[in-house]
């Protein structure tokens, strides 16, 4: 969400760059206007949030666990995260996967900003053992 955002896209900068791509790539701070990521769905605050198109938002607690595990395949970026009522929601950052293949610890398989991501069994099992609020569902990759 940003001041002057039209209801329908595409949302482009004067030089033709897609605003949503810039945000999802972690460059919201470089845009000529402030960007707020607001929680879009759900009744409770989990450690992974869906914003309705701006990409994934992760708690700093989740990121700390991933760092402790030495997980490869993701990046975080600063983002002004807000609750549904517009109040600040501290302890969250923008989150994106950096791989679109299954040969890394975490991936979104090229879904680009989806709230679904895939991890190795090692990472999924370690996340299950935490007190983080996450929905973890086993998936069998298909060829």
Image (tube, helix red, strand yellow):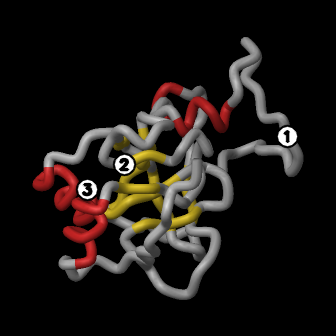
Using the image, tell me which numbered label, if any, was put on residue 142: none
The x and y percentages for residue 24 are 54, 39
Q: Measure the C-alpha gap from mark 1 to mark 2.
A: 29 Å
Q: Is residue 18 above or below residue 35?
A: above
Under tag 2, what secondary structure?
strand
Residue receiving disc 2:
106
Q: Nearer the viewer, residue 48 or 106?
A: 106
Check if mark 3's residue and mark 2's residue have beta carbons within 8 Å: no
Q: Give the camera-side residue of 97 and 119.
A: 119
Residue at label 3?
63
Q: Is residue 50 above or below residue 14?
A: below
Q: CA distance from mark 3 to mark 2?
A: 12 Å
Give the residue displayed 58% in from the left and 30% down from the top: 22
The tag on residue 9 is 1
Direction bottom: furthest residue: 43
Q: Foreground mark, 1 or 3? A: 3
Alpha carbons under labels 1 and 3: distance apart: 31 Å
Q: Secondary structure at mark 1?
A: loop
Q: Are marks 1 and 3 in contact (CB under 8 Å)?
A: no
Of the residues under marks 1 and 3, which one precedes in the sequence? 1
Left or right: residue 13 compared with residue 88: right
Front: mark 1 or 2: 2
Q: Is residue 123 left or right of residue 51?
A: left
Q: Is residue 6 left or right of residue 46?
A: right
User: Looking at the image, is mark 3 or mark 2 earlier in the sequence?
Assistant: 3
Q: Position of residue 54 (x, y in %)?
A: 61, 49
- For the point 39% across and 76% down, the residue is 134
Task: Give neighbour class at mark 1: few <14, some 14-19, many 20+ (Cα, 10 Å).
Answer: few
In the image, residue 41 lies at what x, y percent?
Answer: 63, 75
Q: Residue at 62%, 45% (x, y): give it.
A: 111
Quick one: which residue is furthest to the front in this view?
Answer: 143
């Amino acid at each position: 969400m940003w001041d002057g955002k039209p209801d329908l896209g595409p949302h482009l900068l004067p030089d033709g760059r897609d605003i949503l791509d810039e945000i999802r790539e972690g460059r919201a701070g470089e845009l000529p206007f402030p960007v707020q990521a607001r929680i879009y769905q759900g009744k409770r605050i989990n450690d992974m949030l869906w914003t309705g198109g701006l990409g994934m938002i992760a708690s700093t607690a989740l990121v700390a666990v991933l760092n402790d595990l030495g997980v490869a395949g993701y990046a975080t970026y600063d983002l002004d995260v807000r609750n549904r009522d517009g109040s600040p929601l501290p302890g969250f950052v923008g989150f994106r996967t950096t791989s679109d293949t299954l040969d890394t610890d975490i991936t979104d398989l090229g879904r680009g900003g989806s709230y679904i991501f895939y991890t190795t069994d090692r990472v999924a099992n370690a996340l299950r053992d935490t007190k983080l609020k996450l929905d973890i569902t086993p998936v069998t990759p298909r060829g």
